[in-house]
């Protein structure tokens, strides 16, 4: 692990350059440029807010105001968009860079670091726009906003641990990359993003809590919607799950790291 971190540090300039080039390439001929990184999640928020707010707004305990549902939804989408982007891109991070891995000598772990840096910038832009929208709607989270960096890191490491584990398996079994997007769709509806947990019958709530993103999304909502610190008890399971996934990804990488290049 120490050697891997040292290699990453030695290639830090390559990593920064790769992140910069990724943005430059992605939006080279786009007039809106980086705005496209936030248009999709914001469009998703607007669609859900306008279509579902009439049905859901009256059933959001503790949230008052005309735009309360839009605020609630935005908080959930902020955390979920980071998770899904990192997870989805991690599935193909080694496959998509197969030629690069074969032709250049650099730490393979630089690829997920580049991916993480790119996704964090996307999420930061979405956060800034979300806060601007909150301000226009007369809502501000207050001092609880300082919990967001910790929640962002937890979401990032959870998605990386899970995504890299599946990404390594995907090199050898390509069906994984086709199946996971389906599970992501199910995961969205098994996470309290467009509804509150209180709407789910008590006897079925444990099913949602098996999803590690449930506690994290509820923490986002506590911070951004209700202006209070998250329930730390709800974060114990996501933290443990993240550690397990990180250990699994490290183990798979140690065992299959060299074989991946041959399989690509």
Image (cartoon, rainbow, N blue to C red):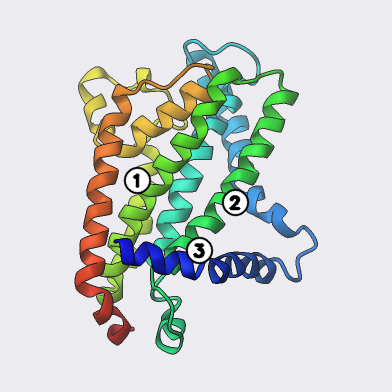
Give the residue drawn at x 34%, y 83%.
264
Mark 2 and mark 1: Cα distance apart in space: 26 Å
Question: What secondary structure is marked by label 3?
Answer: helix
* Residue in the foreground of this view, choosing between 48 and 140: 140
Question: What secondary structure is marked by label 2?
Answer: helix
- Image spot of residue 175 (x, y percent): 28, 70
Q: Along the polypeptide, which appears first: circle 2 or circle 1?
A: 2
Quarter where residue 87 is shown: bottom left
Mark 3 and mark 1: Cα distance apart in space: 28 Å
Quarter where residue 2 is shown: bottom left
Question: What secondary structure is marked by label 1?
Answer: helix
- Dot 2: within a 10 Å radius of its alpha carbon, few (fewer than 14), some, or many (20 or more) residues? some
- Image spot of residue 192 (x, y percent): 40, 30
- Image spot of residue 187 (x, y percent): 35, 44
Circles 2, 3 touching at the beta carbon (< 8 Å):
no
Most distant residue in the right direction: 31
Depth check, mark 2 against mark 1: the one in front is 2
* Residue in the foreground of this view, choosing between 24 and 208: 24
Circles 3, 1 touching at the beta carbon (< 8 Å):
no
Depth check, mark 3 against mark 1: the one in front is 3
Mark 2 and mark 3: Cα distance apart in space: 11 Å
Q: Which residue is mark 1?
A: 186
């Amino acid at each position: 692990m120490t050697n891997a971190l040292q290699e990453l540090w030695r290639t830090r300039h390559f990593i920064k350059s790769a992140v910069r080039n990724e943005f430059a390439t992605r939006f080279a001929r786009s007039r809106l440029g980086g705005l496209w990184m936030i248009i999709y999640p914001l469009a998703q928020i607007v669609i859900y807010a306008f279509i579902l707010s009439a049905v859901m707004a009256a059933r959001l305990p503790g949230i008052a105001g005309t735009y309360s549902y839009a605020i609630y939804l935005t908080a959930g989408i902020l955390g979920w968009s980071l998770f899904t982007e990192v997870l989805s891109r991690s599935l193909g991070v080694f496959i998509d860079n197969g030629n690069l891995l074969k032709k250049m000598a650099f730490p393979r772990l630089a690829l997920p670091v580049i991916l993480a840096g790119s996704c964090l910038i996307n999420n930061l832009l979405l956060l800034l726009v979300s806060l601007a929208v909150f301000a226009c709607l007369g809502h501000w989270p207050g001092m609880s906003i300082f919990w967001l960096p910790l929640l962002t890191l937890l979401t990032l490491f959870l998605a990386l641990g899970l995504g890299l584990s599946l990404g390594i398996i995907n090199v050898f079994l390509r069906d994984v990359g086709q199946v996971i997007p389906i599970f992501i769709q199910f995961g969205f509806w098994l996470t309290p993003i467009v509804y509150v947990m209180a709407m789910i019958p008590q006897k079925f709530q444990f099913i949602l809590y098996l999803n590690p993103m449930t506690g994290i999304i509820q923490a986002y909502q506590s911070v951004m919607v209700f202006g209070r610190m998250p329930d730390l008890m709800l974060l114990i399971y996501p933290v443990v799950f993240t550690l397990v996934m990180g250990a699994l990804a490290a183990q798979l990488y140690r065992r299959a790291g060299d074989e991946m290049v041959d399989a690509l």
